[in-house]
Image (cartoon, grey):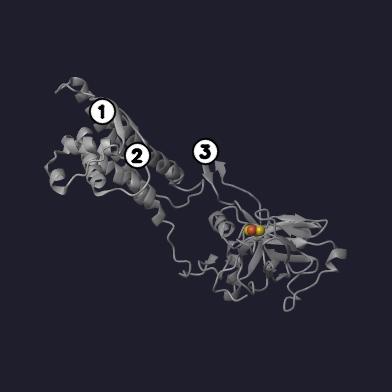
Amino acid sequence: MSENNKKYSNEELSKMSNDELARLGTELDGVTVAYRKERFPIANDPAEKRASRKVTILLALSILFGIAFIGVYLFWPWEYKHLAEDGVWLYTIYTPLLGITAGLSITLLGAAVVAYTKSFVPEEISVQTRHDGPSEEVDRRTLVALLNDSWKTSTLGRRPVIAGLAGTGAVLAGLTIALPLGGIVKNPWKAKAMGIQGDGTLWTTGWTLVEQGEKVYLGRDTGAIAEEHDGHYSTKGVSRLIRMRPEDLDAASMETVFPLTEDMVNDGDKFDKDRDVYEEHMHSIHGPRNSVMLIRLRPEDADKAILREGQEDFHYGDYFAYSKICTHIGCPTSLYEQQTNRILCPCHQSQFDALQHGKPIFGPAARALPELSISVDEEGYMYADRNFIEPVGPAFWERRS
Ligand code: FES
């Protein structure tokens, strides 16, 4: 509450200087300035010049790193390169460079603000009593005067270089936060050419290639990586995905498999040590809706399986293949409990029954895991004999199943 009860007319207020209004403002706000000392009371103090140079350098460096961040974000080669490829080193340092340039830009800007405040803003101790209620006209006018006073005493008005650099630094620091958001704005309905990750829409996966007449095997991940030959890494002859035969899996066990098209096969009698299919295999593994759980039930459990209407022939003997993408919000449902034949999603504990066509039996998921129809060819390799009959993954508003 104001201690000064005098009412001021607009005329009186207009006649007052900024200093008088600022003093009046502190009085009206119940603020007592107990101590105030200018940092550099003597003009042309060399210490002031040194402080000014320090702040200028910090701001200039902050701007430099802000520009570097934008340059790296826009022009650095960011697309995935595997170990054996040219440019893998540049790709590897892309993310660290973004972090370092953004971090330094913001940190240096902060350091400049702190240095400026400690060097140029007067030292002051003020005491204020709190009051309630809306502000009166006089309070508003005096507040403006106080802000003007702060601007004046900050000495920023007569330091155009520092003010300009600080403004530019603040804009660039803001851009380092705002700019990356542009990269995550995507159109989820925009279809591209169909490939091993589908066509980019939510309805398709690598298994959709079956609809185009391609043979798609169930590929198991060997975990193989680029090997060093003569001091160089090479992925020639490295097969990350290999075809599966039913006998590769024991009863009551599970294997994660990925779509492996015929032209990507490099194993068994088709193995060629000079072929390089590693990158295509990695694209299949990285396909967001590609992973499938191949489960081999015990024969006595398989006899009890309840098959979903319309999907009676989707399994191959004791082998059942379910999408690994949880129908709740899309985590990998990676835990298969062999005693109960339950599939558990670790994210929010949804459970699905492998004996009941992947039906949810606990937790927030409301839809069964889509089942992939599988078979075995004349060479004994497992393949998908049709695409999923429903979209894979969590619900989205256009889906009808
Ligand atoms: S994502 Fe699987 S339970 Fe939530």
Q: Secondary structure at mark 1?
A: loop
Q: Which residue is mark 3?
A: 231
Q: Secondary structure at mark 3?
A: loop
Q: Which quarter shows the N terminus?
A: top left
Label ID, residue 328: none
**Mark 1 or mark 3: whose residue is earlier in sequence:** 1
**Mark 2 or mark 1: whose residue is earlier in sequence:** 2
User: Is residue 96 at least partly visible in the picture?
Assistant: yes
User: Is residue 275 at least partly visible in the picture?
Assistant: no
Give the amino acid at mark 3.
Answer: Gly
Q: Is residue 306 above or below residue 177?
A: below
Frontmost residue, 153 versus 75: 153
Q: Quadrant of ligand 1?
A: bottom right
Q: Which residue is mark 2?
A: 105
On the image, the x and y values in percent for residue 108 come to 34, 35
- Mark 2, Cα crowd under 10 Å, few <14 / some 14-19 / many 20+, is many
Label 1 – label 3 distance at C-alpha? 63 Å
Give the amino acid at mark 2.
Answer: Ser
Q: Which quarter shows the C terminus?
A: bottom right
Do the residues bearing badges 2 and 1 touch, measured as CB atoms within 8 Å?
no
